[in-house]
Image: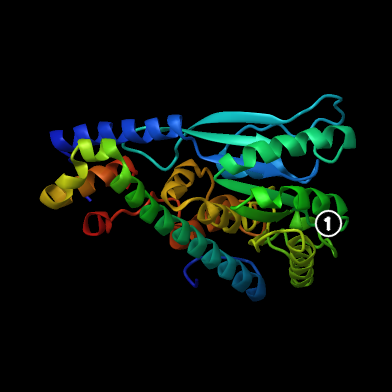
C-alpha cells in the first residue's frame, strides 16, 4: 500500500484495504461459481453439442478458449 | 492474450452469442423480490443489475404486483454485445394495506416456485418484524432458494457512518453484527430451512458484492452464469463513495487491488469440459 498515496488515518486505511480484499474474494467466488455453471450449461445444451463446440475443445482447445475469452471480454 | 481469432473463432462467437441470447430469451433468470414497502428492494436490484425499477410511490390504491422482464446489455462481454434478460417479480406495496396484501401473497405463492432466487429484504433500522414473520410463515414452503438481505446498514445507530472510507464506524459495525444476528434469529423461526443473511447498503454499494455472490450461489447450479453476465456493478462503485480519497487515490487503489471488473476467467474450461 505504500505506493498508493493517501491521507487517511492508518486505522481507516487498514479497514478500507481489508474490505477491499473481502469484496474481491467475493467477486472471485462468484466468477468461479459462474465458470463452473457455464460449463454445466454448455455440457447439457443440445445446440452446443450440435455446434460441435464441445467436440472441438479437445481438437481446437486453445482456439476455442480464445473464442470464449473474446466473447467474455478478456 | 492475442486478439486474432480466425474464421472458426468468429463463427463460434456468433453461435455462442446466439445460444446464450436464446437461453436468456427462453428461460430468463428470475428473481422474486419480497419485503415491506420502503426497505429498498428496488434500489437493491437497480444497484446490482442496472435495472430501472421505480421506487415506491407514496400512496396507491390498487394492486401493485408486477412481473417485469428487463433487457440488459451485459457489461461482462466485450467481443460481442450480448442481450440478456432478467425477470423480476415484485410487490412494491407489500405491507401498506392489509386488504391488498392477501392478493400479493397469493401471487407470490404462485410465482415463487418458478424463481431462481427469492430475495427477502428488510431494513436494518426496522425492529418491527411481525409482518415479515407473518408473511414468511405463509411463503417459506415455496422458497427453496431464499436469501435475506438487511439493507440500509448505514442508518444503524449510532449513525456515524465513516464517509471517508464508506464503511461503518467500529461501533456501528458492532451494532450491525448484532442486528444481523437478531434478524436471522427472529426470521429463521418462520423458515422451513435456514438461509443466508447479508447486511449491506445498496445506496453505498457496501457489501453489495457479498449479497450478489450469495444470491448467485443460491440459484440453480447450471444457471448461475446468467446472473454473472447480468452483474452491473463492481468494487469500484463502493470505492467511489470513499470521500477520504481523491479521485487519483481511488484510481490508484482500484488499479492495484480491483480485478473483479475483468470478465469471467475461462482458463480452465478446455481442461474441464
Can residue B97 be seen in the rendering of this structure?
A: no
Horizontally, residue B221 falls left or right of residue A62, namely right
Residue B144 at x, y percent in the picture: 60, 53
Q: Quadrant of residue B206?
A: bottom right
Residue B211 lies, in percent from the top left, at 60, 55
Taking depth in this image into account, of B239 and B216 the one nearest to the observer is B216
As drawn, B118 above or below B185: above
Residue B157, quarter of picture: bottom right
Q: B271 or B253, which is in the foreground?
A: B271
Which corner quadrant of the image does residue B207 belong to?
bottom right
Left/right of residue B73 with respect to residue B241 in the rendered view: left
Rate crowding at label 1 as few (under 14), some (14 to 19) or many (20 or more) other CA atoms within 10 Å. some
Q: Tell me the element at label 1.
A: loop
Q: Which residue is mark 1?
A: B125
Q: Toward the viewer: B212 or B32?
A: B32
Q: Chain of mark 1?
A: B
| Residue name at image x 41 percent, y 49 percent | B222
Residue located 26% across and 59% down the image: B272
Q: Residue at x 57, y 70 (%)?
A: A18
Which percent across, then down, holds residue B37? 81, 41
Residue B112 in view in this figure: yes
Kindly identify the residue that appears in the image at 15 percent across and 45 percent down: A56
Task: Give x and y (percent) for residue B153.
Answer: 75, 58
Amino acid at each position: 500500500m505504500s505506493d498508493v498515496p493517501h491521507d487517511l488515518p492508518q486505522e481507516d486505511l487498514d479497514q478500507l484495504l481489508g474490505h477491499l480484499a473481502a469484496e474481491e474474494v467475493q467477486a472471485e467466488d462468484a466468477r468461479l461459481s459462474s465458470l463452473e455453471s457455464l460449463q454445466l450449461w454448455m455440457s447439457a445444451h443440445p445446440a452446443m453439442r450440435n455446434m460441435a463446440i464441445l467436440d472441438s475443445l479437445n481438437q481446437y482447445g486453445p482456439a476455442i478458449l480464445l473464442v470464449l475469452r473474446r466473447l467474455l471480454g478478456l | 492474450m492475442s486478439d486474432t481469432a480466425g474464421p472458426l473463432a468468429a463463427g463460434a462467437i456468433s453461435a455462442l452469442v446466439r445460444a446464450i441470447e436464446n437461453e436468456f430469451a427462453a428461460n430468463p433468470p428470475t428473481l422474486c423480490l419480497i419485503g415491506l414497502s420502503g426497505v429498498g428492494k428496488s434500489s437493491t436490484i437497480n444497484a446490482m443489475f442496472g435495472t430501472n425499477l421505480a421506487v415506491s410511490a407514496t400512496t396507491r390504491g390498487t394492486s401493485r404486483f408486477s412481473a417485469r422482464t428487463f433487457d440488459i446489455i451485459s457489461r461482462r462481454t466485450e467481443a460481442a454485445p450480448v442481450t440478456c434478460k432478467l425477470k423480476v417479480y415484485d410487490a412494491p406495496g407489500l405491507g401498506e394495506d392489509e386488504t391488498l396484501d392477501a392478493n400479493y401473497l397469493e401471487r407470490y405463492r404462485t410465482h415463487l416456485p418458478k424463481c431462481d432466487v427469492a430475495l427477502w429484504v428488510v431494513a436494518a433500522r426496522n425492529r418491527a418484524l411481525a409482518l415479515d414473520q407473518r408473511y414468511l410463515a405463509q411463503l417459506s414452503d415455496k422458497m427453496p432458494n431464499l436469501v435475506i438481505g438487511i439493507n440500509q446498514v448505514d442508518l444503524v445507530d449510532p449513525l456515524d457512518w465513516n464517509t471517508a472510507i464508506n464503511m461503518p464506524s467500529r461501533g456501528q459495525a458492532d451494532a450491525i453484527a448484532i442486528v444481523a444476528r437478531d434478524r436471522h434469529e427472529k426470521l429463521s423461526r418462520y423458515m422451513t430451512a435456514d438461509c443466508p443473511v447479508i447486511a449491506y447498503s445498496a445506496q453505498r454499494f457496501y457489501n453489495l458484492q457479498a449479497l450478489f455472490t450469495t444470491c448467485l450461489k443460491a440459484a440453480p447450479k447450471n444457471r448461475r452464469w446468467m446472473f454473472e453476465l447480468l452483474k452491473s456493478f463492481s468494487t469500484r462503485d463502493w470505492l467511489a463513495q470513499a470521500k477520504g480519497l481523491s479521485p487519483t487515490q481511488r484510481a490508484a487503489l482500484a488499479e492495484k487491488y480491483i480485478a473483479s471488473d475483468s470478465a469471467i476467467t475461462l482458463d480452465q474450461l478446455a481442461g474441464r469440459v
